Amino acid sequence: MSHAMALAAGIGGEGLWSISRALARGLTDRGEYKRMMDHADSPGRGDRDGRGNHSEAALKTFCKWFLKVTLDQIALSAKLFDLDGPEKRCRRLVEDTIDDRRVPDLVSAVLRHGALERGDAQVVPKTSERAARNTLSKLTAAGYLASASPKTPVRPAFPLECRERLFPNLFADGNLPERWRRRTGRH
């Protein structure tokens, strides 16, 4: 239910993350979710603890725990993805691998906007249409950009062999806090 509600709210992880995974791992151990669910279903404690059969105080405790798990996962994802750094790292990578001064600006524009119409490619580096097409061809051939067809907009694509340079700590051991290494299985 939580996963479905997150998707409906437009905050799905696109296969990289889900609230279900976060809840299954918990904050301290894998059994924490079941314990918290059992606690949330506990009977009310007196006349002032909720209106129905279940404890309102226990439900509030569960909700606070749920939000802590979610915030912990946001912090973990921000650390792993380093969302402020990919554009700089991608610019440096394409500068090192493709000999074309227009490449970094074009890649940055596509990263910032999510996609770029092929006709707009000449506007970014302020060059001719032919030079922009050549630059796009170099970037798509190298795997930094992709598109459904030669006429559709280009979107970012990250070559698998460059994953560690583009997203350090995401796929291999890195400088993560001990509690995250335990939870992700990275020792």
Image (cartoon, grey):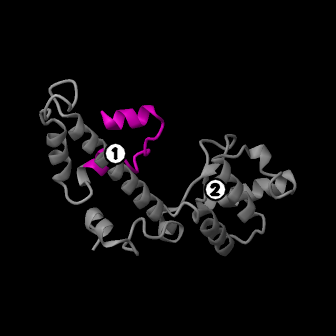
Q: Is residue 137 visible?
A: yes
Instruction: Check whether the beta carbons of the residues at disc 2 and disc 1 lie within 8 A of each other.
Output: no
- 64 displayed left or right of 51: right
Mark 2: few/some/many CA within 10 Å (<14, 14-19, 20+): some
* Label at residue 140: 2
User: Which of the two discs, 2 and 1, labels the residue nearer the N terminus?
Assistant: 1
Q: Describe the element under mark 2 as helix, strand or loop.
A: helix
Q: Residue at x 70, y 40 (%)?
A: 151
Relative image position of residue 55 (x, y in whole percent): 18, 34
Q: Amino acid at mark 1?
A: Ile
Check the picture and name the quadrant holding the C terminus.
bottom left
Q: Which residue is mark 1?
A: 19
* Quadrant hosting residue 52: top left
Please tell me whether mark 2 or mark 1 is closer to you in this view: 1
Q: Nearer the viewer, residue 74 or 82?
A: 74
Q: Amino acid at mark 2?
A: Thr
Relative image position of residue 120 (x, y in whole percent): 79, 46
In whole angstroms, how far apart are the C-alphas of marks 2 and 1?
34 Å
Residue extent of the magenta highlight: 1-23
Q: Residue at x 25, y 54 (%)?
A: 26
